[in-house]
Image (spheres, grey):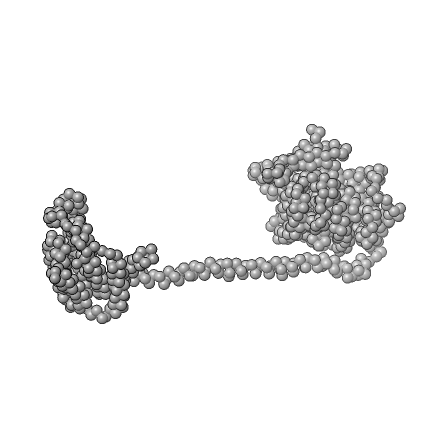
């Protein structure tokens, strides 16, 4: 009895359950916390996929950075208590419809094609491979990413500056 | 030059050049008298060419000059050019001659016009001369029709020369419309003929007819349609109503266009295509009957007119009926002869009347009187014209009129013959009625009917030289022609009964006698005379209600159809467009509600789009 | 677990994120939904990378994570700005672009 399917099932359940909680909780702060949980579970999924580096990145940037930012935003906008979802009945039906249809479409597509089960071997050190790829084959996007961050930084500072 | 083709072409192009010169060089036209001199000079040149051409053509043969116009694979569809033979050159002389004399006369008659108006008048005159000559010399139906329409246009322009007068403007439009009704028939006839024969050319058609190669089926309809054009242009019943109203134009215009040339175009057309009409005797019979009826009808109408120009206008209608009747009897050359003599003496009468109007200041014969003493020269020339028209021997009209009566008898058209005889009696009567009222007796009292005259009849004087010279030329010509025919009878195509000449002369003398008794001697009371024919007189006073009938047709039919079409256009055609635009607006109005401003709606839309794409590629692609 | 399981997981997560985006009235809630959708994409990428034996997919994931971080930062800056101006973060009230 392999451990792997059990691990996957547990982690997948966690991801989905906490995701549902994110979208259904009335309290926005709770939503954020559930989001953090979901992102952490996703890091676990990455581990089952032998992507240790990505799991680490996920935890650092997503579960750590993004959640922090969102919490700050919530505090600034002073909306700790969220609104009742039931008030948006119009969107509820639409959303359920769209999401449901999309789910069916994607699942149908995925299940209709035979997909590999066996995992091919990865090149020895994945992290090293990623690092080398970043600095050789993908060096240009890597540098542009730096530019992107600069732009984002400047933009964020500009937007959030205090009124004169 | 000895080629008649070249000579006639010169005669044709000189007035065209004058027109182009006056039309394009505006300063020349606006200068008035210099423009007039240019036009008159070119007209003189045209006349000399025409006379020379006739002198050569009278010996026989013809000359044909053609330039291909509309190209097609198997030769040109139609050409333009000149066909100069005995008939066309003779007609050309008449046109060029009267045109020249009228232009000369206008120098005096229109001396009071402003310079730009005068220039405009002479431009129109030159254009008319060119158009009429183009018609006369036309070698095929297409050129004939084009010049036919051009002539109609010039008539419109010249009748409405004093366009600020509403009556003149209306008369011009009426002339145009009435002749247009006939022109439609002419066009249809020409096209049908082309379909039947495959050519427009006169000489080619003549060959076909001579060879018996022209199918007779449907030819009656064709010749009738062509005749319709003549009905309009030559003022046959019922399309004669425009000619009396056309007297709103200047008198020289009436002399030229509505006496000698344009109105005779219909007669000329039938003469030119007589070989075609000979193939359809049933149509010729219609022509004869309508002509005789027109002659009688117009003669009765002339008896009750007090406007001297209207008397002459109805007289012209009547004489045109004579010409048509002769053609209908099958003797086209007799009708053509009367066309020529009538051209001379009717122009003379109109120009004489113009002199009288110019002197007295009014058209009303009852505003005149005693002009024999105050305008002796005018009296003489007018009397010459009247005697010609009445058909007195040794004057121009006698021989041609007698020939027509003989032709009717020889052609076996008995009732038309009687109508024409009665018309001859009436012609003499109404013309001498005018003579006795206007030229004899005492001058009319002051303020009698004359707007500008205070007893102007008493102070009238003879015309100036520019007007008198053409009058004398025409008068001499009338007498010369009359004497010439009396001396040298051209041989007749038929045998006239012996009692014909005495009858013709007797009718004329009887008419003159009755007029003398009624209007000079006052032995017969005019009122009682007209009372004896009260019905006819009242009908004549209303112009036999023909104008009213036409007006009713116009109001009822044409305006009704126009209103219907207008309604369809406004509500159906525009309605469709308006409906489409309303739909577009409505749809836009409703579609804009998709833009709710809520970003979540847009996300929803995107999601739907993605779903659709998945469905499409997965299950339908 | 085969590739299918991971793809199904990613699909479900994506649908849940979409539901969140459409239904949430709070703008920050909408952003959280977007986060979930991006997360699903990442799972997809890594799964394919693993089952193709090619770490390029993981490099791609690194990029998407970074870009997501930048986007969240800016998005929240905008939310704060709107809150300052309009005193509301409820998406329904932000309908100036209504047609």
| The C terminus of chain B sits in image quarter | bottom left
Is residue B293 or residue C4 the one in the foreground? C4
Residue B131, quarter of picture: top right
Is residue B341 or residue B527 the one in the foreground? B341
Q: Residue furthest top?
A: B1
Taking the spot 75% from the left edge, 60% from the top edge, the residue there is B538
Where residue A56 sits: x, y (%)? 10, 54
Residue B550 vertical position relative to residue B189 in the rendered view, above or below: below
Is residue A3 visible to the viewer in this orientation of the structure? yes
Residue B62 vertical position relative to residue B418 in the rendered view, above or below: above
Is residue B323 visible to the viewer in this orientation of the structure? no
Residue B33 vertical position relative to residue A160 in the rendered view, above or below: above
| Residue A17 relative to residue B355: left or right | left
Where residue B110 sits: x, y (%)? 65, 43
Where residue B144 sits: x, y (%)? 66, 42
Residue B34, quarter of picture: top right
């Amino acid at each position: 009895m392999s451990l792997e399917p059990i691990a996957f099932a547990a982690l997948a359940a966690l991801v989905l359950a906490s995701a549902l909680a994110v979208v259904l909780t009335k309290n926005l702060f709770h939503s954020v916390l559930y989001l953090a949980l979901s992102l952490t579970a996703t890091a676990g999924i990455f581990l089952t996929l032998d992507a240790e580096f990505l799991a680490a990145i996920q935890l650092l940037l997503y579960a750590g950075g993004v959640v922090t930012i969102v919490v700050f935003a919530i505090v600034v906008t002073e909306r700790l208590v969220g609104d009742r979802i039931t008030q948006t009945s119009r969107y509820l039906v639409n959303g359920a419809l769209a999401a449901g249809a999309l789910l069916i479409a994607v699942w149908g597509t995925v299940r209709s094609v035979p997909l590999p089960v066996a995992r091919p071997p990865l090149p020895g050190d994945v992290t090293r491979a990623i690092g080398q790829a970043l600095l050789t084959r993908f060096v240009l996007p890597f540098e542009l990413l730096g530019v992107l961050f600069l732009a984002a930084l400047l933009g964020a500072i500009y937007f959030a500056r205090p009124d004169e | 030059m000895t080629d008649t083709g070249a000579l006639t072409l010169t005669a044709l192009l000189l007035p065209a050049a004058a027109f182009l010169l006056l039309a394009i060089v505006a300063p020349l036209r606006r200068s008035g008298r210099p423009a007039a001199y240019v036009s008159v000079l070119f007209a003189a040149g045209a006349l000399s060419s025409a006379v020379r051409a006739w002198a050569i053509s009278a010996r026989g043969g013809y000359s044909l000059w053609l330039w291909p116009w509309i190209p097609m694979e198997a030769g040109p569809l139609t050409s333009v050019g000149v066909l100069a033979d005995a008939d066309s050159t003779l007609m050309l002389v008449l046109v060029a001659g009267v045109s020249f004399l009228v232009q000369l006369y206008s120098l005096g008659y229109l001396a009071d016009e402003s310079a730009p108006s005068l220039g405009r008048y002479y431009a129109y005159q030159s254009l008319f001369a060119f158009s009429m000559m183009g018609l006369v010399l036309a070698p095929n139906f297409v050129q004939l029709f084009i010049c036919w329409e051009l002539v109609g246009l010039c008539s419109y322009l010249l009748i409405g020369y004093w366009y600020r007068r509403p009556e003149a403007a209306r008369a011009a439009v009426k002339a145009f419309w009435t002749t247009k009704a006939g022109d439609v028939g002419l066009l249809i006839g020409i096209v049908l003929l082309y379909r039947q024969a495959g050519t427009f050319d006169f000489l080619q058609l003549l060959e076909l007819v001579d060879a018996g190669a022209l199918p007779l089926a449907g030819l009656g309809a064709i010749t009738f349609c062509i005749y319709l054009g003549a009905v309009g242009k030559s003022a046959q019943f019922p399309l004669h109503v425009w000619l009396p109203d056309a007297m709103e134009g200047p008198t020289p215009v009436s002399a030229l266009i509505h006496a000698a040339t344009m109105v005779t175009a219909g007669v000329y057309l039938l003469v030119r295509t007589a070989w075609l009409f000979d193939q359809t005797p049933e149509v010729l019979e219609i022509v004869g009957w309508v002509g005789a009826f027109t002659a009688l009808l117009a003669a009765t109408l002339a008896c009750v007119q007090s406007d001297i120009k209207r008397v002459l206008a109805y007289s012209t209608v009547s004489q045109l009926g004579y010409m048509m009747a002769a053609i209908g009897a099958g003797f086209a050359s007799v009708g053509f002869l009367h066309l020529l003599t009538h051209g001379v003496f009717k122009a003379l009468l109109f120009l004489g009347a113009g002199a009288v109007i110019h002197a007295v200041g009014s058209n009303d014969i009852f505003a005149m009187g005693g002009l024999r003493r105050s305008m002796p020269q005018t009296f003489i020339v007018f009397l010459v014209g009247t005697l010609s028209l009445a058909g007195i021997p040794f004057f121009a009209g006698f021989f041609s009129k007698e020939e027509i009566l003989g032709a009717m008898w020889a052609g076996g058209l008995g009732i038309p013959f009687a109508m024409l005889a009665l018309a001859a009696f009436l012609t003499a009567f109404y013309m001498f009625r005018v003579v006795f009222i206007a030229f004899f007796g005492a001058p009319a009292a002051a303020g009698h009917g004359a707007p500008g005259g205070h007893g102007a009849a008493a102070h009238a004087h003879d015309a100036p030289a520019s007007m008198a010279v053409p009058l004398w030329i025409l008068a001499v010509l009338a007498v010369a022609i009359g004497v010439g025919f009396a001396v040298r009878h051209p041989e007749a195509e038929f045998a006239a009964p012996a009692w014909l000449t005495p009858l013709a002369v007797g009718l004329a003398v009887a008419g003159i006698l009755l007029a003398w008794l009624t209007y000079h001697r006052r032995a017969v009371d005019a009122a009682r005379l007209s009372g004896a024919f009260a019905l006819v007189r009242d009908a004549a006073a209303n112009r036999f209600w023909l104008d009213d009938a036409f007006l009713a047709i116009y109001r009822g039919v044409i305006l009704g159809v126009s209103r219907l079409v207008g309604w369809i256009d406004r509500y159906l055609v525009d309605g469709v467009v308006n409906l489409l635009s309303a739909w577009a607006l409505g749809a836009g109005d409703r579609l804009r509600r998709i833009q709710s401003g809520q970003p979540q709606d847009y996300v929803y839309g995107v999601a739907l789009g993605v779903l659709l794409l998945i469905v499409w590629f997965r299950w339908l692609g | 677990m085969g590739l299918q399981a991971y793809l199904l997981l990613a699909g479900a997560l994506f649908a849940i994120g979409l539901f969140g985006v459409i239904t949430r009235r709070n703008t920050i809630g909408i952003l959280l939904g977007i986060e979930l959708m991006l997360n699903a994409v990442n799972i997809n990428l890594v799964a394919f990378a693993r089952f193709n034996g090619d770490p390029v997919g993981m490099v791609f994931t690194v990029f998407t994570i970074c870009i997501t971080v930048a986007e969240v930062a800016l998005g929240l800056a905008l939310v704060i700005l709107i809150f300052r101006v309009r005193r509301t973060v409820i998406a329904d009230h932000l309908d100036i672009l209504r047609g």
